[in-house]
Image: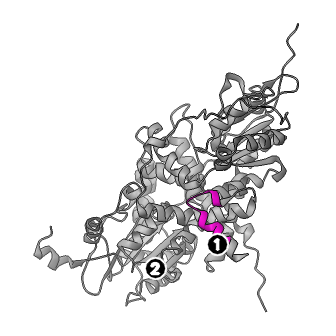
Amino acid sequence: MRSPLERLRTGDPGPPDFVGVGALGSGTGWWHAMLLAHPEIRPPRARRRALHYFDRFCAQELTDADVAAYHERFPRRRGTITGEWTGRYMFDAWTPPLLHRAAPGAKLIAMLSDPIERYRAIFTERLAKRAEDETIYMADVVDRRSYAGQVARLRRFYDPERILVLQFEQCRRDPLTQYRRTLEFLEVRDRDFAPGRLRRKAAGKPEALHVAVLLRLGLAEGTKRRLSEKLAGRPLARTTAPLWPDLEAALHAALDPEAEALRAMVPGLDLALWPNFAHLSAPQPVAA
Amino acid sequence: MAAAPSTTGPPDFIGVGTQRSGTTWWFETLLGHPQIKPPRGRRKEQHFFDRFCAQELTDADVAAYHARFSRGPGQIAGEWTPRYMHDFWTPRLIARAAPEAKLLIMFRDPIERFRSGVPHRLNRTAGGRMEAVTADAIERGRYATQLRRMLACHDASKLLILQYEKCVADPADQYRRTLRFLGVDADHEHDGFERRRGTTQASNKQPLPAHLMDGLRATMEPEVARLAEMTPEIDVGLWKNFAHLRAENALST
């Protein structure tokens, strides 16, 4: 139970104003951190980004007490909004109905990235981690990157107007426009604000000195990456294991129809920005 | 009298789906036919292609796969691995390793399949995180998506779609249908269709939380509707969780 003093300091709890629902490994940590730099946007209690609150309800009922406990995580003072971002919410079939019950007025944000680039990164990670003779499976990665079905499912529980689909590559290329677009969607008052790190990136300024130094240090790869990404304020490029023709063809057979269905649902989606799907981005005939 | 020479080579048939849908029962039933032979070691599920998401399939691998199937004159041989259809890399590899093979798919009400699949996986996955297991079981029920991937590299005429509920209701009829498709003597009298099941989960089935049912329906209704469009042999009315879709179709036509 929070003390009246704490309540006075942090404000009253309630359902989150926004929830980031996807997608895993698509720059969501970066974008949420950029949002939290805005003076009107507050983090959940304890500053955790991804609450994973609904994960366990795959096998149990959500009670009113659970809903109240979720709301407790989101104190906010007058004039501010608050929200979390858990990348797997969009993938877990049981979560959209729960989210709609616990936060029916929330706005949802999904940041999506090139599904095959992400597949390569995860494949590389799993290969590096696997024990000798251990079999690795990759079916789950394609399941998780089948975005069209997931967005369609969200829309069965939330009005499409309440769902913002961002494209990671667009945010990286033109962060200020996409940041403003996100602020407009969230309806904050100050929409001219942008964090210094985004302005620096947009102005094409070089890596800050401390980031360059870290990259040269012999820190463990993962730690170095996380630190560097935190300091750079954006995800860094990764090296990936090569794929082979059979696998590439199978990935396209599975994911091309998903990408096309997604574009039909999300008109702003620019497949030309996804290197593995640019072939689908031939100019569409414009109706006269 | 000398034994007839047996030959090895690519399987004549491969069952590619789906898990928890009575495939062990149906495979065992087929093995009761004198012309149908199991793979070496009598193992129904070869899981041969599983590992080829992490490495390329070589010609030597293909030859090793062929070596698992031997049959005498007038006989056919095959296997049934339910995850082949779910593994996105496998349909192409089957087209390469066994281009002439006939493919079998058994579909069952995907929500009933889910109810059977979750306890099945939890029993077998040491330390498996509940949400990962649940999400995987849901994904395996996206039938239309998986069938579309199969059809991207296999001709529809090579595919037999079976419906578990029809096989239970009239096994003799569906047995003959399967035999005709496989090109063996369809007049063979089976000595009874007692359920030689794999592992039953009937006692582990729990009622599902209402929100989980909502999420399952939201995921699977579009898939079932598409499946019904793609495969007229599926009778959605036999799937109690989706029978309302058939009523809607009837109204709209």
Tell me if residue B69 comes above or below residue A268 in the rendering.
Answer: above
Is residue B241 within the magenta segment? yes
Q: Are marks 1 and 2 on the same chain?
A: no
Mark 1, secondary structure of its residue: helix
Q: Could you say which disc has been placed on residue A199 in the image? A: 2
Horizontal relation, residue B60 to residue A75: left or right: right
Which residue lies at the image location 61% right of the left edge and 45% below the top edge? B21
Identified by mark 2, the residue type is Arg
Which residues are drawn in magenta? Answer: B237-249
The residue that mark 1 highlights is B248
Kindly tell me whether residue A239 is visible in this rendering: no
Towards the viewer: A243 or A267: A267
Label 2 neighbourhood size at 10 Å, few (<14), some (14-19), many (20+)?
Answer: some
Of circles 1 and 2, the one toward us is: 1
- Residue B149 is situated, as x and y percent measured from the top left of the image, at 72, 55
Is residue B45 within the magenta segment? no
Identified by mark 1, the residue type is Glu
Chain letter for mark 2: A
